Image: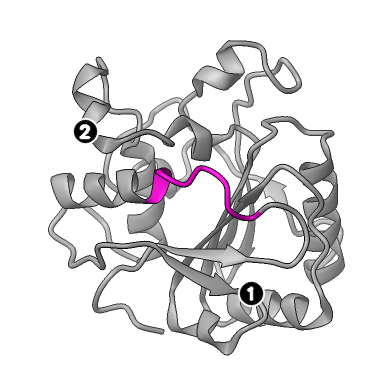
Amino acid sequence: MQRSKFTFARLKYNSGDWETDQRMPSNILNSLLEYTTIPLDEEEKIVELSSPDLFKYPFCYLSGHKLVQFSQQEAVNFKTYVHNGGFVFVDDCNHDIDGLFARSFETQMSNLFGPTALKKIPNNHGIYNSFFKFEKGPPTTSFELNGWGDDLVHDYLKAITINNRIGVLYSNKDYGCEWDYDFRNKRFLAEDNTKFGVNIILYAMGINS
């Protein structure tokens, strides 16, 4: 995997709607440029989950609202990628725990890694301190506060851990849509809400502040 320069790689899978929150990657890349000194590719890379190109990138993003049903090759690649040290950030754009994306994605993870592999991570996990400090765990999104989805504020994230490192980070909080705005509009926010995205990526890259 190429670790000398960070690339925001988005996974394209055959089922569902993989091309969500299209402004989010450039927003996160801007945050990495603003807060860190890691070298960056300036544009998002779309990667077919079924392609061997997947194994070039240590970080990948997967999201959607609809069905997640991996093909045989997609399933093989996903499992191999994670076991080989890759990191996948998965975000449910429905921000609920019983919608189609959540149910189908969790089924895929159970099939690939076992029924108990996807577990809640504690709110003092290292990912909440990898750069910025989030003492209460995952920051809340406006979608949760507005009562959309399942009307819950999820005070945890889930993960599949391989060799004591997160391989799959799973969110029902809809961070993708929360960060889906032109990065130049951050100046209107009281607090930059993309900071947790920086934490996720630095953790995935094995970089600590």
Q: Residues within 10 Å of mark 1 (few under 14, many from 20)?
A: many
The residue tagged 1 is 49
Side of 141 relative to 148 (left or right): left
Kind of element beneath mark 1: loop
Q: Name above or below for residue 185 compared with residue 85.
A: above
Badge 2 or badge 1: first in the primary sequence: 1
Rendering quarter of residue 154: top right
Residue at 73% across, 30% down: 96
The residue tagged 2 is 184
Side of 42 relative to 28 (left or right): left
Q: Position of residue 27 (x, y in %)?
A: 31, 43
Kind of element beneath mark 2: helix
Q: Position of residue 94 (x, y in %)?
A: 70, 33
Q: Nearer the viewer, mark 2 or mark 1?
A: 2
Along the line of sight, the residue nearer the viewer: 169 or 76: 76
Q: Where, quadrant-wise, is the N terminus in this rendering? A: bottom left
Rendering quarter of residue 156: top right
Along the line of sight, the residue nearer the viewer: 142 or 195: 142
Q: Position of residue 34 (x, y in %)?
A: 15, 45
Q: For residue 19: magenta?
A: yes
| Amino acid of disc 1 | Leu
Q: For residue 126: magenta?
A: no
Q: Which residues are magenta?
A: 18-25
| Amino acid of disc 2 | Arg
For the residues marked 2 and 1, what is the alpha-carbon distance in whole angstroms?
A: 31 Å
Q: Residues within 10 Å of mark 2 (few under 14, many from 20)?
A: few
Q: Name above or below for residue 16 compared with residue 142.
A: below
Residue at 53% across, 80% down: 54
